[in-house]
Image (cartoon, rainbow, N blue to C red):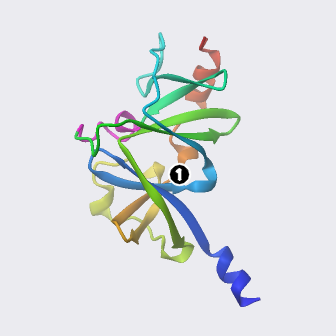
Amino acid sequence: MVRDEKKEDIVQLIGFYVGRKFFGADILAVREILRDPIIEAVDDAPDTISGCVRLRGQAIPIVDLKQRLEKMSPVSQSDHLWVLVAQVGDTTLGFLADAVTRIFRIDSNSILPAPEIILSGLPSQYIRGVCESESGMLVVLDLNRLITGDEISALEKMELH
């Protein structure tokens, strides 16, 4: 019985970089990871939407995390683009990252409130907390908070062909 309780305390986070910052998101929120997808331009898209990708006949809007997370450093960790595809409410979105690392198994009790030094330059409403990983300090994002209800409504009105 103790083993089952311990299992429930583990959170699996997918690690990724946006600029020089190291982030994580709950793997249960991520449906798919795309490497170097073709991103098509979208007319009249909000600033945080860098375009859309085609995935099995569906056009998926791509949220530019650098733009969303306060115009972070444009320095990439790799020559590739990565898209984390996630379900946000009833909308499927992609989140653009510079690199995806691996899945980390973290004790949920080790996710702590982010100290001010970590929050410096980051909008705190998107941050669930921070934790230590083998790769360094991981800022845990809540993907559901990265886009507002108004932005989702605007996206639903856009025609993505």
Q: Is residue 9 above or below residue 121?
A: below
Residue 70: quadrant of the picture? top left
User: Residue 30, percent across and down?
Assistant: 59, 47
| Residue at image coords 37%, 46% | 99
* Residue 69 falls inside the magenta stretch: yes
Q: Nearer the viewer, residue 104 or 9?
A: 104
Q: Nearer the viewer, residue 133 or 54?
A: 54
User: Is 74 placed left or right of 50 in the picture?
Assistant: left
Asked if one can make out residue 36 in the rendered structure from this viewpoint, the answer is yes
Q: Amino acid at mark 1?
A: Asp
| Residue at image coords 40%, 38% | 65
Other residues around mark 1 within 10 Å, as few (<14) / some (14–19) / many (≥20): some
| Residue at image coords 31%, 60% | 118
Residue bearing mark 1: 142
- Please, what is the dominant secondary structure of the magenta stretch? loop
For the record, the magenta segment spans: 65-74
Furthest residue toward bottom: 2
